[in-house]
Amino acid sequence: MDRMRILDELVWLSHEIGKEERQLVILGEGNTSAYNGDGTFWVKASGHSLPTIGAEGFSLVNLETILAYLDGPVLDDQGVADALAGSLVEPGYPKPSVETFLHALCMKECGAKFIAHSHAVSVNQILCSIRGAEPFKGNICPDQIVVCGSAPAVVPYVDPGFHLALAVRDEFRRYIAVYGRSPKVLLMENHGIVSLGSTAKEAFNIQLMADKWAKILIGATTMGGIEYLSEENVERISNRLDEKYRQRILEK
Ligand SMILES: [Zn+2]
């Protein structure tokens, strides 16, 4: 796919995430990105709102240029602004979101092609509670496992931008070392959720299912507690051929 077709899909994803009735983002919350497969990616520019964003609301960024800053000294606010400006493919693009570092890591460390970050009300009701991300660490039903994977990546609250990206990089590397695969979901306590998709549809589906997952966790807690699936059942669901088929169909 060429860059402009990928950008069209990214605009579609952004509008879907931004629909008011979904309660995933309001105002200028959240951001989205897509990898072009040629060392560049599109990422939402600062100050745009997902429901109304158009193609002009995205910046084109060099992947390796932005990632190289994470290997250097810790940047202050001005350093971050300079790094973002210095990573643009051409200077005419708008200022990329401060979460551009995080999006680049989802592509580089995890191989994601389309990424959506939201502040979903349901998910944050749990992530902003005294239990943090802990309720998400067990599995509750086949749909959740098929769409969101059997384990989310998790980071505690970290200052958004450069410092958050460093924490996320550590977590992605730990996750891949433990599980031998990439996460589909990143939960950021007291902040929100990131979905890592191979397509725009998959990044969207993960957001929808995570929203449902969170609502079920909240409901089950009010019903006396969450009954998690056994490890044996989780293993079986993760490896069923019909569930793998369903997974592939849903991503298209
Ligand atoms: Zn955020």
Image (spheres, grey):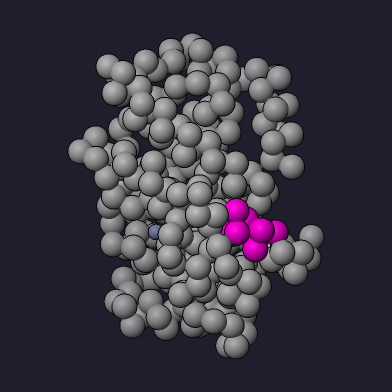
Judge by depth and name the residue closer to the eye, 10 or 111.
10
Q: Residue shown at 41%/28% (left/top)?
A: 216
Query: Where 140 falls versus 34 (above or below)?
Result: above
Query: Where 223 falls versus 25 (above or below)?
Result: above
What residue span does the magenta drawing correspond to? 9-16
Apparent side of residue 156 relative to residue 217 in the rendered image (left or right): left
Q: Residue shown at 39%/41% (left/top)?
A: 122
Q: Residue furthest right?
A: 1
* Residue 69, percent from left and from top: 43, 71
Apparent side of residue 60 relative to residue 117 in the rendered image (left or right): right
Apparent side of residue 177 relative to residue 147 in the rendered image (left or right): left
Q: Is residue 234 magenta?
A: no
Q: Quadrant of the C terminus?
A: top right
* Residue 123, percent from left and from top: 38, 42
Q: Quadrant of the N terminus?
A: bottom right
Query: Where 110 falls versus 135 (above or below)?
Result: below
